[in-house]
Amino acid sequence: MGGAAWAGRAYDGRMRTAAQRPRPAREPGRVHWMELFFDLVFVAFIGQLAHGIHGDPGWPEFGTYVLLFFPAWWAWVNIVSVINLLPGLTSRVLGLSMVAAMAAAGLMAAAAPHAFGERAWAFSLANAAMRGLLLVLWLHEHRKLSPEQPWRIWMYNGGTSLLWFIAVFLPLHAAVILWAVAIAVEVGMIAASRWIGAQRNLGGINLEHATERLGLFVVIVLGESIFTIVSELAQDWHPGPALASALGFMIVALLGWAFFQYGMDVLASGLGQLRKREDFSGILQTTLFMPFALVLGVTSIAAAIATAIPAPNTLLPPGAAVALGGGLALFYGTNAIVSLRFGAPLRSVLPWGIPAVVAALVLVPLGGKLPAAVVLALAVALLLLLTVQAEANARRRPDPP
């Protein structure tokens, strides 16, 4: 009886311990609601930056947009990566982390319009806070999972957080140098992951989670584009702007159709092929770097549409024509490069990749010769042709066994 009673008490103790043990917030391949909540901040960020390339932007405006958007994009992919590689985070830790990341990203967004001016200190502080959060998360999990010294974590997140924090107190020209050094350290360590011993950590990437997170981010970017179109039409409620808005909506809708009807399947299967080949550098390239060009393309297209809506019967300004044609070329060029990186044969990519990029670039000079609404209509026609071609290819493709 005494032994049975002791065994019963021990069993009850194990049950209580198991019940009290924090459970992971999500399944490894699933996206948590707080991650989606965090992504909403980037709607504001993209909107803030995109205003800088409305109208007739020149190369300084485009350059400023790229230079400020990449730190935000890089912060986002770092947050996504840590959540992906640490599926054991509890609901409270994940929730608090996402709220803290939202605060940092929100400050970054508010500082963005004048980040190369009076708000450079706030932009620096927000980036320092983001990397400080990543440092805490990685160290918290590393203590439980690995006996090794976490020098890579301290260098990747701690060192770069310190650089961003020092930049808070420096004049702009010196601060920008530290921004570049900090990002170069992070990108360099990712690129050199095989040589610094971090390659084995990449084997833990959950491809389902990575695919869904990237798809959801593209949803946000396209959603910001729709919001811009609706806002412009609301301010100029006339037949001409209504026509331009309808054409702009069709452009965004067709881009979304291309990405979600075809691109997501290619992304999921392509990442799986890279995993089978243990090509982790390919996974990094196609999830961290190449999508940045695709997102740049979509936001540039949205800026051109916003410029065309108030003045549909006038010539498209040169900067807006570059944003439209160049944005479409970036979108389809990136998709073509990603497909090739996944292992698709040239004969299947070139028939749509080259015509799409060339035709998109032809829209740039046409912007200075045709009314803006006509140029938008030509863009719609191009996307419709590409969609019909993709649908035909999909119908000819044999069904999986």
Image (spheres, helix red, strand yellow):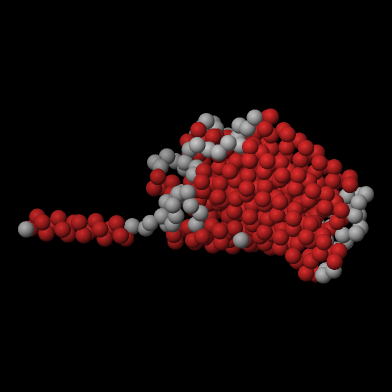
| Quadrant of res 22 | bottom left
Q: Nearer the viewer, residue 78 or 271?
A: 271
The quadrant of the rendering that contains the N terminus is bottom left
Q: Nearer the viewer, residue 74 or 8?
A: 8
Residue at the spot 87% in from the left edge and 53% down from the top edge: 374
Q: Which residue is drawn at 71% across and 60% down?
A: 226
Q: Where is residue 351 in the image (x, y as percent from the top left)?
A: 73, 34
Left or right of 22, for residue 156: right
Position of residue 202 measured from the top left corner of the image (x, y, whole percent): 50, 39
Left or right: where does residue 288 sit relative to residue 7? right
Q: Is residue 101 above or below residue 153?
A: below
Could you tell me if residue 30 is visible in this image? yes
Residue in the foreground of this view, choosing between 69 and 111: 69
Identify which residue is drawn at 61% across, 32% down.
Answer: 343
Q: Can you give x and y, in whole percent of width and height, for residue 100 in the image?
A: 54, 61
Is residue 116 visible in the rendered structure shown here? no
Residue at the right extreme, as displayed: 369
Residue toward you, 320 or 17: 320
Horizontal side, residue 323 vs residue 397: left or right:
right
Task: Tell me if residue 191 comes above or below residue 125 in the rendering.
Answer: above
What count of labels does the image hold?
0
Name the residue: 70% across, 54% down. Answer: 253
Whole-percent x, y for residue 383 in the image: 75, 47
